[in-house]
Amino acid sequence: MYFMNKDVIYIEAEDDITDILAKIKAAKNKIVALVPPKKASVLHSAVNFKLITKTAMRTEKTVVLISSDPSLLRLAAGANIPVAKTLQSKPKLPDADVATELGDNVDGDVIEAVEETPEKGKKIEVTDGKKPAAKKAAAKTAPAEKADMEIDEAAEEKKASRKKAATKIPNFKKNQKKIIAGAAAGLALLLFIIWASVFAPAVNIVVNIKTTGENFAEKVNFTSTEGNDDVDSGLFYVETKSVKKSVKGEFTATGQVDKGEKASGTVTVKVNSPVFFNSLDFRQTITVPSGTSFTHSGLKYVSTSQATITVDDDNIVNRGTNCSVDNRRIRCDLSADATATINVVASENGDKYNISATNSGWSSGASAVSVASSSAMTGGSSKIVKTVTDKDVAEAEASLDMSVEGEARDELSEEFGDDYLLITSSFKASEPRVTTSPALNEEVGDGVTPQIIKEIEYSISAVKREDVERFIKKVSDERIGDDTQMVHDTGIDKAFVDAFNDDGNGAFSGKLKSVVKIGPTITEAEVMEKSLGKKVGEVQTMIKSIKGVTSVEVKPSYFWVTKVPKNQNKVHIELKTDEE
């Protein structure tokens, strides 16, 4: 870019021509850009432009005027000064026809007087191209002197004309890429230096302290009612969270059930003889209850209704012959059958229960009666199907992957977060709910794979870590009772609650256990105060001299960092404990 290979002079409103000439002489580059303000009275003078041109020639510099002001352009044209609209525009010489008579008759002696003023910063007021003193001298100038001045002026103009012809307009875009690359590299270097000296320096100070570990065990209580806690006395507010988990699996049904029809018919029963009567009215009722079993050739049938049979004199016929007294009861042999017909159904499905009518081969489940005959048993059919049994469910449940318990622990721990101390002994699972599809004892259709689902709700309780740590430190500090010793580590990371007990009414108890590290009294603030602004070696020596410090390691962020920054935000203190 144009402004990267030249000196840029921004003219202030209060600058005079001597200030501008001095800046041109002091410029380091061969190309000098003059950037005037909106109102620059110092440049609204042809004499001053001539002075600028002459100074540029003597110092072997090219001056470019950065302006679009028509009046300044005309003056620049008269002084053979290149112009550009902006610092990025390509400079060019103004058209010659825009130059006016301004500056055409400038006194060379005046130019020399202003340009060669020995005292830096001395201002010389120029009016109409002459100094005030020169005005008076001019009035008395002899015609010969005036002629000499005109000759000198003509020679000067001729010389300026030749200089104008030889003036080369610089091409600011020719090496644009190189200029940009160089500028970027310079900027990067500058930014790196700033970063390395201001932002990069940081130090990590690790102080190892000798400590002793002491077991901590205190009985504590918990409450599930928020606001009822008292941490200092060992009463903590406990929070409980739960999560439901389900496990699914497949199994094979092994049960078989006949889903066919049961055969049915009737049997005729008769009262067995002899019959015992308790009174002399010789009348007794025999009842055959519903559900009485009757068996024929190993096939069992069951009565579906109750039957009542009455025995009286009509069944005895001759009391004298057929009756006798037996242990204060009247015993009578029946000479006529007392019978009843009963509906029965097969105990199981199957066509094997279909039998013909028969008068023999039956046995009765009722001791008072026997089967005299039966009708044909019909309607029995078989349809064997698979069913889910208790054994199937038990085996399927035992084979389930119960890794969900670990997942539940992890989820509950994540839900509580790092701010809580989990009471692991409070973790529990609800009574599982097991269901199968098809259900227990139901038929399993063809092509159907039975499934089992086991649902469990897991829960765990936790307390705030900061409350636990506060309690441990308070109790431990009270036990120390010595200002030269302090708690360096409460052991909160390994603290746990043992023997957690839930009384079922929202109150809990347990024993809080930890290992507390006790050591000499030294704090991060003390180390920070002794380290800020000090050299690395000095800090190591100073901190190491503190009683109880076993070693000190100062780790600068970069190899060139040799001192601890004064900014506390750039210093990290880490106190480590070395347990005996």
Image (cartoon, rainbow, N blue to C red):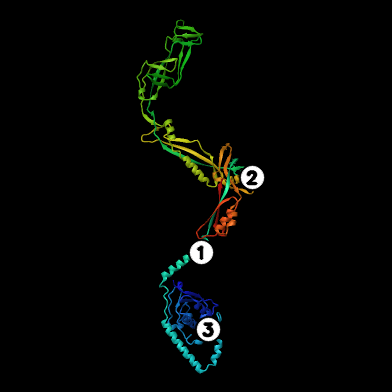
Q: Is residue 321 above or below residue 478?
A: above
Question: Tag 1, which secondary structure?
Answer: helix
- Quarter of image, res 386: top left
Identify the disc placed on residue 478: 2
Q: Is disc 3 in contact with disc 1, using a CB cutoff of under 8 Å? A: no
Q: Is residue 211 above or below residue 90?
A: above
Question: Tag 2, which secondary structure?
Answer: helix
Q: Is residue 302 above or below residue 447?
A: above
Q: How many marks?
A: 3
Residue 7 drawn at (x, y percent): 48, 74
Tell me the residue that label 3 is attached to. 114
Q: What's the amino acid at mark 1?
A: Ile
Q: Is disc 1 in contact with disc 2, using a CB cutoff of under 8 Å? A: no
Mark 1, Cα crowd under 10 Å, few <14 / some 14-19 / many 20+, is few
The answer for how far apart the CA atoms under marks 1 and 2 are is: 51 Å
Q: Earlier in the sequence, mark 3 or mark 2?
A: 3
Tell me the residue that label 1 is attached to. 194
Identify the disc placed on residue 128: none
